[in-house]
Amino acid sequence: MFKGITGNVFILGLVSFFTDVSSEMIYPLLPLFLTGLLGAGPAFLGAIEGVAESTASLLKLLSGIVSDRVRRRKRLILAGYTISALMRPLIGSATSPLAVLLIRTGDRVGKGIRTSPRDALIADSVDPSLRGKAYGFHRSMDHAGALVGPLLATFLLAFFVTDLRQLFWLAGIPGLIAVLLIVWQVKEAERSPRQETGLHLATLPPGRLRRYLLVLFLFTLGNSSDAFLLLKAGAVGTPSYRLPLLWAFFHLVKMLSSMPFGALSDRIGRRSVIVAGWCVYSLSYLGFGVARSEWQIWLLFGVYGLFFGLTEGVEKAFLVDMAQPAQRGAAFGWYNFAIGAGALPASLIFGGIWQYEGNVAPFLFGASLAGVAAAALLLLVKAPPAAGKEIS
């Protein structure tokens, strides 16, 4: 194995791989399914994504705090992945946009239960000097699944399946494989659970960690669901049969860039890499706003993929650098809550602007907010000494 990629990190990477194969067989086709077959509009699409992610955000906070107080994080991880694996294929039975909303929310409930304990278990299982690389590896495996999922969906639709509903049911198989991997292969890391009682839901973490979470929330307000990017691709003429391929290309860029940029953050510092990622996000959203042809969409999806490589794993490693070891679950809970709490207003705002002002203005809004958040991170959040060399 790669240096720093322990058994737990590797297996949890495989779990995320199979989970994303399942999820991404469905996700790039969901906007088409909703707007084409079920008659939903852009605003309702934003409501589905926003409500689902915001519901998950509170559970991410709760499960993170609880995972610090129990000896076995694995039980929470297993419960979350099992719920999602059972709920996700039910989209194949949906006959109305409301049904999709309820099923999608159920899927995100599972994500809310598992995410913070899983990320804390990764931190428990890896050397501090290799956190960026470990989280980068995990994100790479996640994106590898997101690459395979659309390709598998394309293959099945081309040769074996003629109905989207059948495809959605088949997407349950890799999800169940992920659950079995957790049961048989994931191990508990040695740690002492916190002894305090009470969940402290009303108390944000102090100091620079609080400022970091607030800046993340600000950025998230301009970071709407990626479903809108697929809708934009369709609006400029990308045919529906190429949407899964576009989505696969997007995840190929994310997969190839996550681990190298995570390792880079171990050397030069997390904050600089995150700021660079948010600037890339701002530029890509400006591009999406003015894009008028399919080749521009493909180019922009590639640039946008670099944003994820620069930020997803690195943001988590930066969080662990600032959190006390006994509070990692709670720190990830607040991290995921900050992001999830911004998801509902972000998607509702974006969908509303799109519906009433056209498809240029919402992208300009997202780009502007990302630029403000990048400046705020530089000005308000100092890197902890243990985070490594920081370029200022």
Image (spheres, rainbow, N blue to C red):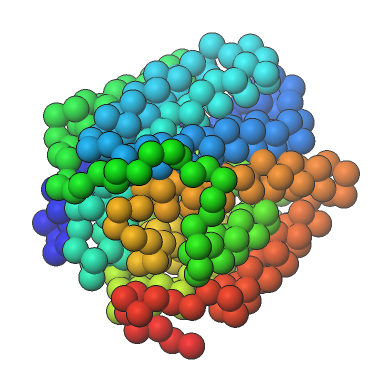
Q: Quadrant of the N terminus?
A: bottom left
Relative to residue 382, is residue 297 drawn left or right?
right
User: Which residue is drawn at the image coordinates 35% and 53% (left, top)?
Assistant: 328
Q: 60 or 242, which is in the foreground?
A: 60
Q: Which x, y percent locates residue 273? A: 45, 74
Q: Which x, y percent locates residue 196? A: 35, 44
User: Which residue is drawn at the image coordinates 46% and 74% (left, top)?
Assistant: 271
User: Which residue is drawn at the image coordinates 34% and 75% (left, top)?
Assistant: 387
Relative to residue 356, is residue 139 drawn left or right?
left
Residue 91 visible to the viewer? yes
Q: Is residue 389 above or below residue 387?
A: below
Q: Which x, y percent locates residue 229? A: 63, 48
Q: Is residue 284 above or below residue 337?
A: below
Q: Which x, y percent locates residue 9? A: 22, 50
Residue 15 visible to the viewer? no
Q: Is residue 225 above or below residue 154?
A: below
